[in-house]
Image: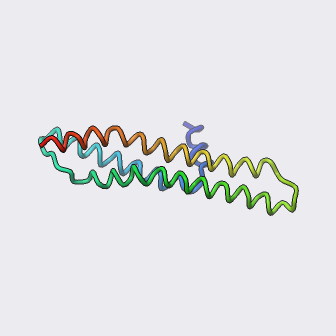
Amino acid sequence: MHRLVALFIAGGPVMWPILALSVAGMAILVWKAFEIRAGRRGPAGLVVVSTIITAEPMLGILGTVVGIMQTFGAMNSSGGSVNPMAATAGIGEALITTAAGLVASLVLLFPYNIIDSMTAEE
């Protein structure tokens, strides 16, 4: 668990919106699953999940850009001598946010498609 928290923190500030959107998307999908089980099959809420699925990889790319910018900033501020630790921290942040955005999107994608197909069967 500590490793997961450390990885989250290493991903930088873009990890927070990815987390918030993931929690919101999963909550909507759980709500829709309970509605379907109760016999109510409507598309309400699914457009929000679809938007979240689309936005999360873009947030991951934003995190990549921010991480690479930090890397170049660290390289420029060093006055010509490159600090490998500063460079790897920015690159690490870039890779972590890219992976987080993709994983978060994929985790929602499959249940979304199942629930969406159930609501279309009316």
Number of labels in the image equals 0
Q: At x 59% / y 37%, what residue is drawn?
A: 3
Q: At x 45% / y 51%, what residue is drawn?
A: 56
Q: Which quarter of the image is occupied by the N terminus?
A: top right
Q: Position of residue 51 (x, y in %)?
A: 36, 55
In the shown orientation, is residue 78 left or right of residue 71? right
Scheme by which the image is coloured = rainbow
Q: At x 87% / y 59%, what residue is drawn?
A: 80
In the shown orientation, is residue 104 left or right of residue 76? left
In the shown orientation, is residue 94 left or right of residue 76? left
Q: Nearer the viewer, residue 86 or 76?
A: 76
The answer to which image quadrant residue 95 occupies is: top right
Q: At x 56% / y 43%, what residue is drawn?
A: 5
Q: Nearer the viewer, residue 47 or 24?
A: 47
| Depicted 55 relative to depicted 95: above or below | below
Q: Which quarter of the image is occupied by the C terminus?
A: top left
In the shown orientation, is residue 15 left or right of residue 106? right
Q: Position of residue 11 (x, y in %)?
A: 59, 49
Q: Position of residue 37 (x, y in %)?
A: 17, 38
The answer to which image quadrant residue 32 occupies is: top left
